Image (cartoon, helix red, strand yellow):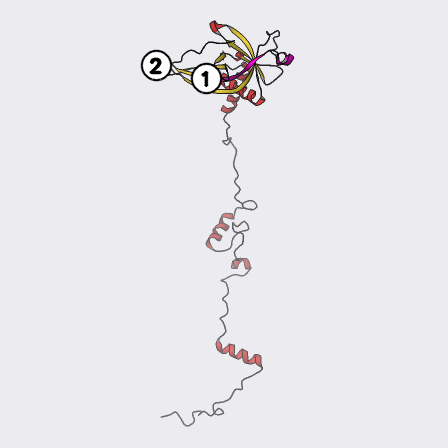
Amino acid sequence: MTSSAPPTLSADAIQRVLFIASAVHIYNIPPLTSNKGYTASAWTAENNKRQIFTARLRAIETAVPLPKDAGESLSTEILLEDPSTGDLFAKAPYTDAGAVEAVLDSSRFFAVRVVGDGGMKATLGIGFEERGEAIDFGICLQECRKVLGLETPSEKKSAAKAKAEAEVKKDYGLKEGQTIMVDIGRKGRRKAGDDDDDGAVAGGSGGGESSLFSIKPPPGPSEKGGGGAMPMLAPPPSAQDVRAEKRRSRGFEPVEKTAAELGFDDGEFGEFQ
């Protein structure tokens, strides 16, 4: 089946390639005999007897601006082309989900409804050599249905459910009567006297059991059991005391002698004139 050349597009039209596969096998498939769908096993029977040739497949999106800035008109076509010359073999306008149908017994084969000259329609089978390419083609068609508004009832239901779940706003506010307890690392429960204890710690005196510091300050006089001010420390020993202590440690005891024994005047003859 050979289709005529595509119509000339306006200068403002923009085309975008959505998908391309360099090698797709084309089959002349028998008419559909069951409402269940197509099966690829009948196409490939007898050593691919129904295969016509191998074509290049492209999915093209065309956007045509509407007058008076009313948006744009979108359309998508599946093109089957000669891989050597690029000549158009057949095209399938993607106007509804039934334009391309997946078969029942394989993930690599599809039934494509093509439109020829004068609006003549026929259904051809296509088969991808790689399963990955077939999966990408199916995803491309799914995105086209979303953009063109051709989603199936099941797809619309799934999309509506996902949208409703996304719009649900969770309320993290406190309900009436609810409170929040913040743990800042203190051990045990807060006591009534903690405020006074904390103030005492900040001022330099003793703190409570729940002090914020890891090492408690020394207790005050009242906590030792005695009243009054803290006792004063004894003064350090003088140099004379240190020397006397050294003599005693060596076993030397100084002998006390009078001034006369030491040869000094005891003042009997009076003071010097």
> What percent of the width, then of the height, locates residue 261?
49, 92
What amino acid type should be assigned to the residue bearing mark 1?
Answer: Glu
Of 195 and 121, the residue lying toward us: 121
Q: Tag 2: Cα neighbours inside 10 Å, few (<14), some, or many (≥20)?
A: few
Of 155 and 265, the residue lying toward us: 155
Mark 2 and mark 1 in contact (Cβ < 8 Å)? no
Question: For the magenta stretch, what is the residue range?
Answer: 45-62
- Residue 68 — which label? 2
Residue 91 in sight from this viewpoint? no
Of 272 and 147, the residue lying toward us: 147
- Residue 61 — which label? 1
Q: Write the residue at 48% across / 20% down.
A: 18
Q: Is residue 244 above or below residue 177?
A: below
> What percent of the width, then of the height, locates residue 185?
54, 45
> What percent of the width, then of the height, locates residue 179?
52, 35
Is tag 1's residue or tag 2's residue first in the polypeptide sequence? 1
What amino acid type should be assigned to the residue bearing mark 2?
Answer: Lys
Q: Residue furthest bottom?
A: 269
Q: Quadrant of the C terminus?
A: bottom left
Q: Write the residue at 53% across / 7% down.
A: 122
Q: Write the residue at 55% across / 9% down.
A: 123
